[in-house]
Image (cartoon, rainbow, N blue to C red):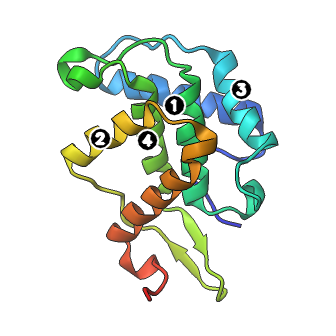
Amino acid sequence: MSQFNFIFSGDLREDALRVCHYIDEFYATLGAPTAEIDLAKVMGVVSGLAQDFPSPLGISNSSPFKKAAAFTASFSAARPILTPLPEPIFHELHTHQNSIIAIELSIDALEGAQLHKENGTLEILKNRIKMSKHFWKDFVGATSVCVPIHHFECLSLIYESLAYQENSTASYPRT
């Protein structure tokens, strides 16, 4: 079992509330008004992932990268946040609020996540994922049009690669 430090607690209501609270805090940090959120869509994402997680390992045995990818893909596709982000801050990406929130929540959740390696060791992702502004813009654009069933694995690999760039000792040996 690998820990993902935000949702997938097993309590769907609590997970949905955490996501909504995260969204409100994100907007508040920007000095923006509270976002209008379609709660049914948030619940749909959380419950959909709990019932039909895209990895055959299921939620409890999947890596935190797969959890981040599943959340990012599903949340971006569902588009539960109706209020755009402030245009003066996010420019042409201000209407990509669902992808931006999904990525930022996933990055926050991966910081400190636990990886249970095949050899029985435990690795903790101590260092936060960082990326260039250019990469971030392209990543937001790409996730804003993702189809969960088709892009889940690619997003998982991207999160894994980004995390291992900042946490090289957590990476599997390269061959």
Q: Amino acid at mark 4?
A: Ile
Give amino acid for label 3: Gly
Report the residue at 62% width, 63% height from top: 63
User: Could you tell which of marks 2 and 3 lies nearer the N-terminus?
Assistant: 3
Residue 138's disc number: 2
Q: CA distance from mark 1 to mark 2?
A: 14 Å
Query: On the image, numbered disc 1 is attached to which residue?
Result: 76
Visible residue check, residue 122: yes
Disc on the earlier residue, 2 or 4 = 4
Q: Amino acid at mark 1?
A: Ser
Q: Which of the two labelled residues, at mark 1 and mark 3, occupies the earlier sequence position?
A: 3
| Viewer-closest of 68 and 4 | 68
> Residue at label 3?
44
Tag 3's secondary structure?
A: helix
Q: Image check: 127 left or right of 121? A: left
What crowding class fits label 2: few (fewer than 14 Cα within 10 Å), some (14-19), or many (20 or more)? few
Residue 95, placed above or below residue 174: above
Q: Quadrant of residue 126?
A: bottom left
Question: In the rendering, at what x and y percent does residue 27 appear?
Answer: 38, 22
Q: Which residue is mark 4?
A: 103
Give the residue type that dot 2 points to: Asp
Mark 2 vs mark 4: give the one in front.
Answer: 2
